[in-house]
Amino acid sequence: MRIAIIVAAATLTSPLSAQELRGPEFFESIADEGERSAALFTEMGEVLTHPRCVNCHPVTGGPTQGDDMRPHSPPVIRGEADFGAAAMNCNTCHSAENVDFTSAPGSIPGHEPWMLAPVSMGWQGVSLRGICEQIKDPGRNGGKTLEALWEHNAHDGLVGWGWDPGEGREPAPGSQEIFGELTRAWIDTGAVCPE
Amino acid sequence: MSSMFVKALQPAPLLLPSRRMVLAGAAGLTLAFFIAPRGLRAQAPAPITAPNAFLRIGADDTVTVLSKHLEMGQGPYTGLATLVAEELDASWDQMRAEGAPADDSLYANLAFGAQGTGGSTAMANSWTQMRMVGATARAMLVAAAAAEWGVPAAEVRIAEGVISHGDRRSGFGAFAARAATMPMPESPPLKDPSAFRLIGTDRPKLDTVGKTNGTAQFTMDIHREGMLTVLVARPPAFGATLVSFDDKAALAVPGVEMVRRIGAGVAVYAKGTYAALKGRRALDVEWDSAQAERRSTDEIFSDFSAAAEAGGQTVEEEGDIAAGFAAAAQIIEGEIRFPYLAHAPMEPLDAVIEVKGGKAELWYGCQFPTFDRPTVAKALGLPVEDVRINVILAGGSFGRRAQGSAHIAQEIGEIAKAAGRDGAFKMLMTREDDLHGGYYRPLTVHRLRAGIDDAGNITAWTNSIANQSIMSGTPMEAMMQGGVDPTSFEGSNALPYVFGSRRIGWAQMESPVPVLWWRSVGHTHTAFAVETFLDRVLEAAGKDPLQGRLDLLKPEALRERAVLETAGRMADWQGPVKDGRGYGIAWAKSFGSYVAQVVEVEDRDGRPHATRVWCAVDCGIAINPNVIRAQMEGGIGYALSTALYSKVSLGPGGGVEQSNFHDYPMLRIHEMPAVEVEIIRSSVDPTGVGEPGVPPLGPALANAWRALTGQVTSELPFPMQSNV
Amino acid sequence: MTQFIVNGQDVTLDIDPDTPLLWALRDDLHLTGTKFGCGVAQCGACTVMLNGMPRRSCVTPLSMVEGGEVTTIEGMTGPEIEAVKQAWVAIDVPQCGWCQSGQIMSATALLQQSATAPTDADIDAAMAGNVCRCATYVRIRAAIHDAARTLEL
């Protein structure tokens, strides 16, 4: 429940619809570089806290699903490799591509690889500032430099799945291209975390 | 089906094999032997073409029992074979079973007077009949051996599948042909129960091996040469009718062969399931919903609640209700709402038909052959004799395959007819078709009221029930007496409790939503209503749930008392709360069997989690304790699934809101409690176990939950999020 | 044209590559041990092994198995499947039986992937994707423990 409230609050801070994402140019008018940087990250937060992303960034337990972030059905656990349990790992159902259901509307999402973000990158119920600090921390972001982080946000396929989530799912706001530009601008302005 | 239905259909005498009947060619039991060619000894017996009997002995000594009851997981193949093998003195290893075809004249359920499986009657109605089959066959084998060996029949022994006299020994197969020519004994003696070797002992089911290696053949597994797969586009609301359709796009899908209008909707015929799915999706269909059910579940509940409040027609009344309430020191009231429920068997409904040269042959898990066979015949315009239904394994049913309307038989018949040519056709439903398809457990409202005097006696008990009738509008309507459908309220009346006064009322409601028996039928809701409300009343009267029930039982309710006491002992009952866990007890008599259960529940994030269940069952003589335990375990899981999750709801405008297992969830393994079952020793003739495990679980769970949290469950399923 | 291996045999199917593997197995290859229960990866009745790992065939387009190796309940071999089948029979697990091929495939995969005897929690996690409407879960659990003992895990 707490998770849902925080996500809702994050969404409420934006005057835009969930489909939109403002590019770096929108923030050029903010004179103070640190403020601009924080604002850029807040805009990135529209993506980072979107259910398409957060559903597979749980802190405890397994993934959630749907825009209401309900528990994953069938029930799955994180497992030792963030890939589910023995005999019930992510690839038991998910594959390298989104697959449309044949008997009803909707699809099962897929990408290669398809797995949970590590616990260290758990975002569910975490504040935007907390997410920001984690993302910047090589000890908790998989040893990524900021440059590597940009590369990840701008070009990683699993990140990109958020904008190509298959039939029956609302994509993350904007596009991976804008998200990459926001990340670039955020880094270039000092990678400041919002309060 | 209800026990009252069973009673209403009870034919006069039990049909037993007799020489007179055979000679007269009467439509009674015919015992015959079919011999498999000797060349096939090392293989399975050859398929038979006219199995008009209950048992077949192969040259390889196998004894195959033709089960007049549909095997849908509840165990009749094994149970009927056990009865035959017991009296035949066969070795269990040589026993086999398969479904008997549709033929009322041979395979009637003796409780119905017609061929059908339901009401947990399979073992009860076959108890004497199948033992007689075994005893008759045994006597004829003995006679054949005696003749062959030239010794007195009285000196021929049979034990463990071996016929012997002195040093001579033989299996059954060698004497099968000669046995068939022997006179059929008038009344072969049946064993005294003390001589039973198989009855009363654990035996794994005969169909288990095939269900572990993929070889078991279910309807959907049947393949016929040139067969087309058929999916039907069905109405979007109950009672909606087809206006028109455009099949151009559907016919353009590769593999789609034809599109036809049938009663159920628009049938798409294709080579394979995937083409049929694509073809159906490409159809453009216009429906008229003017006469459809447009009410939402909330609106239906509101209407039914008002009718229950009004009291309905009286179906049971005893004592002076007004005086009873007047004498009460306190009055407890409650309303409990039960949603529509889908059976959701794991194998969705399906049927296979092949029409060739003016004859039709079908393969499917047919539960009511007596209705289905003439329905298919009529749909095809064929004489009944030219329709053969091979009754095969069903991947679950829970009542769904037993329709008075015979709508699946009608549909498969129309599919074949509408094709306009000979051929084979397989109709199947997707899970979405199944959940949207109606034939639900009736949505039901119970309104209860009880008065308690200062001494804690229940001075008055009233329960009025509003729901649709299952029998009304079907061939079973003839069984309704005085406009009353007993399946609507069975389990709420004839309670063995001492109440100062009582009244049970029933209001028959109408809706275009088709309803059907659903594993334990009326008891699915009556046991919950009675046993949860009684729990509240006992608490108000200051009584322990277990002792309070025992004190309330009429003196003659000995079997009720025994299951309650046994379940209490098994659970080491010490009251409803212990160490942070809740304990609830409930019992029900259904289909002649008595079951009491204690549920242990934990509060997990505001939701009940059942950790353990203790179950005491009295089903008369325990034919196969293994199957009885399995049915109790399964019934408990089925009922727990129902209490926690199951609800088919209609949204605004009447459309079904659920579509598959993500929103009509099933209990999964991590939610299954540990189960202990104890079977009461009995010498009473056996009664069924397929359904009776279900009714007590829901109320026992709700009672445990109320004890733990104080929350009264007034609507099922349990709410997904707790209010506290 | 899709080429792959099914139960050790080379197979070539000239059908729509979007066809779910489930229906290709059942309708085209007549391997009907693999069952349809939901079509949306909710029930596990359609579980097969794809390149040695359990896979829901109802959400597996044929195109995805090109060059791959599929094993169905009919073609399973090895000590784990033998131990599982033996335990399933000894404990008399199935009721209606429709879900049991999938249950057995998941149970076998669990034992193949377990270095030590699976705990109840391991069984819960591995088997949570397989629905049994008859609720044979008590016996499924017992049978997996039994098979693990046979395998001396």
Image (tube, rainbow, N blue to C red):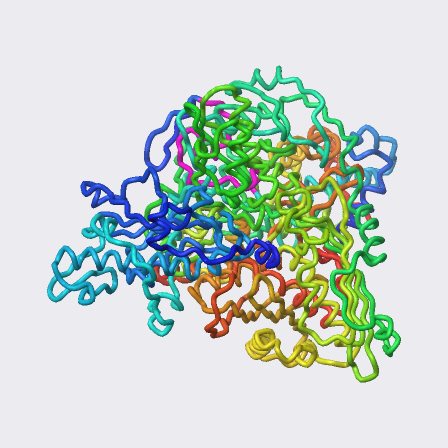
Q: In the image, is residue B412 above or below residue B158?
A: above
Q: Image point 32% across, 33% down: which residue? A: C9
As drawn, is B283 to the left or to the right of C128?
right
Q: Image point 66% across, 57% down: which residue? A: B522
Task: Please indicate, yes or no, whether residue B275 appears anywhere in the rendered image.
Answer: yes
- In this picture, which residue range is highlighted in magenta? C15-41
As drawn, is B513 to the left or to the right of B88?
right
| In front of the other: B583 or B521 | B521
Image quadrant for the N terminus of chain C?
top left
Which image quadrant for residue B158? bottom left
Q: Image point 59% across, 60% down: which residue? A: B694
| In front of the other: A19 or B388 | B388
Whole-percent x and y of residue B600? 62, 70
Q: In the image, is residue B117 above or below residue B270?
A: below
Which image quadrant for residue B696? bottom right
Whole-percent x and y of residue B705? 70, 68
In magenta segment, residue C40: yes
Majority secondary structure in the magenta region: loop
Q: In the image, is residue B42 above or below residue B603?
A: above
Q: Image point 39% across, 60% down: which residue? A: C148
Q: In the image, is residue A68 above or below residue C62?
A: below
Whole-percent x and y of residue A152? 63, 36
Whole-percent x and y of residue B428? 54, 34
Task: Please indicate, yes or no, whether residue A64 appears anywhere in the rendered image.
Answer: no
In magenta segment, residue A86: no
